[in-house]
Image (tube, grey):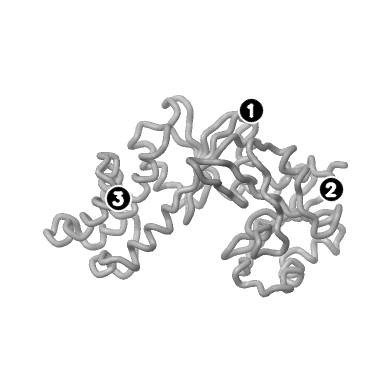
Amino acid sequence: MTVKGQLAALDWGTSSLRAALLDANGAVLDERSLGRGILSVAPGEFPTVFEAACGDWLRAGTPHAIVSGMAGSRQGWMEAPYCACPAGFAEIAAQLAWIERGRIGIVPGLSCEAGGAPDVMRGEETQILGALDLLDSDDALFVLPGTHSKWARVTQGRIESFSTFMTGEFYALLRKHSILARTLPETDGELDEQAFRRGVEQSLRGTGLLHNAFGVRTLSLFDRLAADALPSYLSGLVIGEELRAQELPAESVPVVVIGAPALTRRYEIALQALGASVQSLGSEATWRGLWRIAEVAPW
């Protein structure tokens, strides 16, 4: 049967937990955030944290709760086996892992074969499907930037394939654990768009990140780039390297970027440098995705 009435929707990641109370039409009635990502939750403590996040909603009569993200990982509340691509709402809803049958379900992540090795995602599939619904589209190219950026191609409402890029993690490694750490200022500061674009353009020349990264040090050494612009330049290098691997659609077909505004802005700048058009969405994609999955789930 389909979900009736209100729905408790949870996006439970590695470092944070967000929850929303949705009405019967998917509109957000209440929203809250807890600093209780799965890495901060001890074994056996997940029910207690869940209760703190949305227990009052369930006690007040909300019949169902649906959870996406790393709560379904091996280190989470319950491992939800990956759903193989291609997959859309129906395939994902059919493979919910049940904490409590008919009441609390965990969305499975997705898996696919990419470049000779398996690739996986948890949580991003919900955002992608929610964005499709918000945009009233069946075909699109998505990018979800972050520590591990995801690029996903959707055809006829189903995620066909995706690939992961460790862009944010490589930035952090270079920023904090390479010789560049001695050159870069202590904090990143505000985005310097000119320096960022310069980094993107340098990456697109095709000489590779292993070479380009050393230029962060030498540009500072020869006073060709101010110290406070260096983090933005390095960010441009790593994001440009990520974009260099993509096959972008025609300019008339937008690339959809889903994420926090500060990060999506960087991808907008970089994609526009490649002549691509861009659309951006935020947390609303998660809530819409969870609501639509719940609509077709076998409660």
Q: Earlier in the sequence, mark 3 or mark 1?
A: 1
Residue 6 seen in the figure: yes
Q: Is residue 109 above or below residue 17?
A: above
Instruction: Give the number of callouts.
Output: 3
> In the current view of this chain or complex, which residue is farthest to the front?
116
Q: Residue at x 34, y 34 (%)?
A: 274
Position of residue 118 in the picture relative to residue 263 (left or right)? right
The residue pinned by badge 1 equals 156
| Residue 188, position as x, y percentages in the image | 34, 63
Disc 3/disc 1 C-alpha distance (Å): 35 Å
Position of residue 233 in the picture relative to residue 115 (left or right)? left
**244, 130: nearer the viewer:** 244
Q: Is residue 123 above or below residue 272?
A: below
Which amino acid type corresponds to the residue marked 2 in the rendered image? Gly
Q: Residue at x 48, y 35 (%)?
A: 255
Which amino acid type corresponds to the residue marked 1 in the rendered image? Gln
Tell me where residue 137 sits by quadrant.
top right
| Disc ID at residue 286 | none
In this rendering, which labeled residue sits more in front, label 3 or label 2?
3
The residue pinned by badge 3 equals 209
Q: Secondary structure at mark 2?
A: loop
Q: Residue at x 28, y 48 (%)?
A: 199
**56, 252: nearer the viewer:** 252
The residue pinned by badge 2 equals 5
Residue 9 seen in the figure: no
Which amino acid type corresponds to the residue marked 3 in the rendered image? Leu
